[in-house]
Amino acid sequence: MRGALGGPRLLLRRLREVMAEPISAQARLDKIVVQIASNMVAEVCSLYVLRADGALELYATEGLKSEAVHLTTMRSGEGLVGLIAKSAEPLALADAQKHPAFSYKPETGEEIYHSFLGVPVLRGGNTLGVLVVQNRARRTYSEEEVEALQTTAMLLAEMVASGELEALARPGDDIAVRRPLSLKGTAIVDGVGLGHAVLHEPRVEIKHIVAEDVQGEIERLDGAIAAMRESIDRLIDDGDHGGPGEHREILETFRMFAHDRGWLRRLRETVTTGLTAEAAVERVQNDARARLLRQTDPYLRGRLHDLDDLASRLLHQLTGQPLFVPREALPENAILVARAMGPAALLDYDRARLRGLVLDDGGATSHVAVVARALGIPTVGDVANITSLAEPGDAIIVDGTSGEVQVRPQSDVEGAYAEKARLRARRQEQYHALRDVPAVTKDGTPIELHMNAGLLVDVPHVAETGAASIGLFRTELQFMVAPQFPRMREQYALYKSVMDAVPDRPVTFRTLDIGGDKILPYMTAYEEENPALGWRAIRIGLDRPGLLRSQIRALLRAGAGRELRIMFPMVATVEEFERAKEIADREVAYLTRHDYALPAVLRLGVMVEVPSLLWQLDEVAEKADFLSVGSNDLIQYLFAADRDNKRVAGRFDPLSPPALRALKMIVDAGAAHGKPVTLCGEIGGKPLEAMALIAIGYRGLSMPPASLGPVKTMVLGLDLGQTAHFVKDLMSRHAGRHSLRDELRSFAKAHKVAL
Ligand code: PEP
Ligand code: MG
């Protein structure tokens, strides 16, 4: 195999010529394997291509019997070829037949060949096939030979990915690269979106794989690395972190990798095999991805993302291609596909063209999920490796309700989803028609349906849904999506815009509820064993009164001349509320002293979401102007079941006697003291739960915008007198039950209450 040492460059050049010839795909493959075998002084060269059914099919060979082409197949994991495909790693053996995985296929006539070298054909870390050379003599393949064959496999990866080989597949034996994929992730934002994949960070298209001038390529590579290092240093030194998501820690990791000797050496070595600088970056990254993708350790997988980002920066530096999709280049019906994404980046896209969002990294509590929810973009998160599995322009379907993502769906699947989307749209129209219909039960009790919000983009939903007002404005969302701490003037501007946009209805602002799962990227995080039980919300507000003071000042000023409602989250004792109220009083005094206009009416409320308040209800209802039940937290603390832990979140039912009793105590206390009580947790937006809440006495519910239509439809069909009687009886008869859900559902069905 002398040829392989001096020959990879020559081989690449020859292969490039073959690639350009106007011949059939099969003829091209046949020529390619001949060239590889001859250059590597091997008697055999074979290409196996991965099929949609997981089998590896022999697509071309020099040296094995030609009858075996398109006949011989290996299952994944079967034989040496299957092993390479599965492990995505090269395998070199002096005596292949002694390897326990060796599988003999008589039709190939390979029994006379002893040594074996196979490499995976990789693209974006995914295996597309296996390239093999074999020799009769028992020999050890050198590291350089393994490298050379891997480099050659890159060219073949491009050919497979281009779709050129599809014409060679027999019916039913489709090639895997373009196969339909049905993937499952975490459902984040409800809804179904059909469209075409747009990569948030477009993959760099490598047009030139083979170097014309190796020295020149090394210089290009060195130049690009230097420029990239400089730009990272600049970002760190300036403290200008280039936008949200690019926080110091990430940049420091980049810097570490950008100076990693092993990485740089591998890049240079790969260029010397005859690749262009950009092809070398891709090649080295492919290997790293294949290795890291098999890791289950989340820390190591996280490093893969950092390395991916770095390689991507380097590729953009080398090719001058843009790092992000230009706004005007976004197609209609775009399904955005991203590894991870900052919240501000999502806001930069034209919402009218976005049909869905799929994230590799990013679950329901990620900051981008907050924005996606506000924009109502069907979203699925935690879809491993999605940026490599979907090609730009691929048809793709996002089902944010079930958490399913269909890539390149077959027409029957597409038809089923299109029908689902049409049904949803029709239902939306029906809800829209109810916008101005008052929410009154059949027997005449009005129910106030409010809306939850947290960003300016939420506000138009008030008019669209006909919500009575914003019953919960989560002020922390502005803090979560911002690259740095919003100043008082920015807070003021947001609060004022929100109130201006809803001039005729009071907005209930909740003071900062950070900590727990709501983390600010720019704020020092304190390691806590149990963050949900830790330093969060009003606890931070009281310990760092400067923060709370400036927020209250911004609210008071923004609410000048109108009714302003402020409520405090995670209050555990009445005294905490009194201390918060003192801070508000002091701010009122300060603004009065300085001649600022004040709100016409100021109401201060308490969120009831820590169970200790259940035993201070009379006192808190007396002191507060209103109560708002945070059932998400209340239920998690009542049952000691983490709301974000999939194993336990659904274990206990809010529609159970203990939860309903607790909720009833709160609404009763409000009524006894003449104080309004609303409920603003997620259950208020679910028709069955809302039915039970109304039955036990709730007259105000605040919910996500999309829930208003379904809940109003339920209210309009409800006979409250009859339902209240039923629920009361149910709660007393089955006090020990885990759940009353089935009985409530049967009741609704029997009485034609729409759920
Ligand atoms: C709640 O806890 O129910 C609530 C409305 O607040 P959040 O979900 O923001 O904690
Ligand atoms: Mg809460």
Image: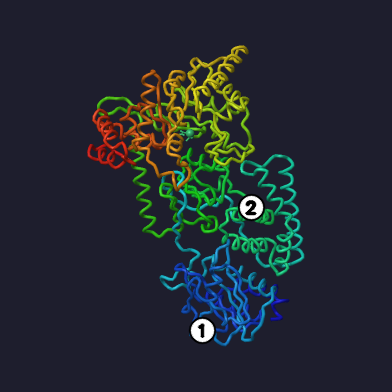
Q: Is residue 43 visible?
A: yes
- The reply to whether the residue tagged 2 has its Cβ within 8 angstroms of ligand 1 is no
Q: Nearer the viewer, residue 287 or 655?
A: 655
**Residue 707, image quadrant:** top left
Q: Is residue 458 above or below residue 37?
A: above
As helix, strand or loop, the secondary structure at mark 1 comes to helix
Q: CA distance from mark 2 to mark 1?
A: 44 Å
**Residue 640, image quadrant:** top left
Q: Is disc 2 surrounded by few (<14), some (14 to 19) or many (20+) residues within 10 Å?
A: some
Residue 108 tag number: 1
- Report the coloring of the rendering: rainbow
Residue 433, horizontal then vertical, whole percent:
33, 34
What kind of residue is marked 2?
Asp
As helix, strand or loop, the secondary structure at mark 2 comes to helix
Q: Is residue 551 above or below residue 688?
A: above
Residue 219, horizontal then vertical, whole percent:
76, 60
Outermost residue, bottom side: 112
What kind of residue is marked 1?
Thr
- Image position of 549 (left or right of 252): left
Q: What residue is disc 2 on?
A: 306
For image coordinates 42% across by 21% down, the residue present is 618
Q: Is residue 704 visible?
A: no
Q: Quadrant of the C terminus?
A: top left
Residue 28, horizontal then vertical, whole percent:
56, 75
Outermost residue, left side: 750
Q: Quadrant of the N terminus?
A: bottom right
